[in-house]
Image: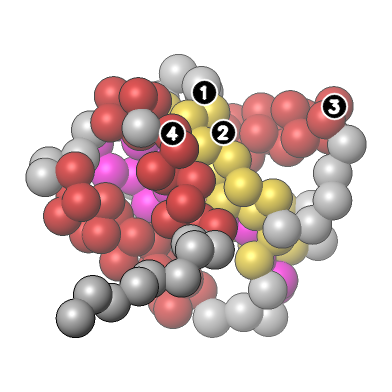
Amino acid sequence: MIRFILLQNRQGKTRLAKYYVPFEESEKHKVEYEVHRLVVNRDPKFTNFVEFRTHKVIYRRYAGLFFSLCVDITDNELAYLECIHLFVEILDHFFSNVCELDLVFNFHKMNSFLLGSSKKLVRRQ
């Protein structure tokens, strides 16, 4: 099960955070700081999986952004790496060569990707 998704730049600024389990606001900031410290200081020759508290963080760096997922310790890491890659491909297709500024200025579109659209599509005939 996914606990949270974080998109952070190299400086540690969180560009997008989606939590699927409840956290207090102070705990969210603490988690974001700890996850960033874990992934940014990690040598690229190591795997993209790291233990975090009682869970596992799976991350991938694309250009200057880190895409991080916190999942249960028993979940399949490679499946989540594929999910991250698919998410980046979707963003790349949607924004035509996505960059960090696309995420900043189109936050509402990013949120709809993660939440799913609650509106029904109406097909015109």
Say which amino acid is labelled 1.
Gly
Judge left or right: residue 22 versus residue 41.
right
Say which amino acid is labelled 3.
Ser
Percent x, y of residue 64: 30, 31
Element marked by disc 3: helix
Reply above or below: 45 against 84. Answer: above
Q: Main secondary structure of the magenta part?
A: strand
Quadrant of the drawing holding the N terminus: bottom right
Asked if residue 6 shows in the view, the reply is yes
Residue 96 or 84: which is nearer the viewer?
96
Say which amino acid is labelled 4.
Phe
In space, the residues marked 4 and 1 are separated at their CA atoms by 18 Å
In space, the residues marked 3 and 2 are separated at their CA atoms by 16 Å
Label 1 vs 2, first from the N-terminus? 1
Quarter of the view holding residue 105: top left
Element marked by disc 1: loop
Magenta stretch contains residue 52: no
Judge left or right: residue 18 versus residue 88.
right
Q: Which residue is mark 1?
A: 12
Q: Which residue is mark 2?
A: 36
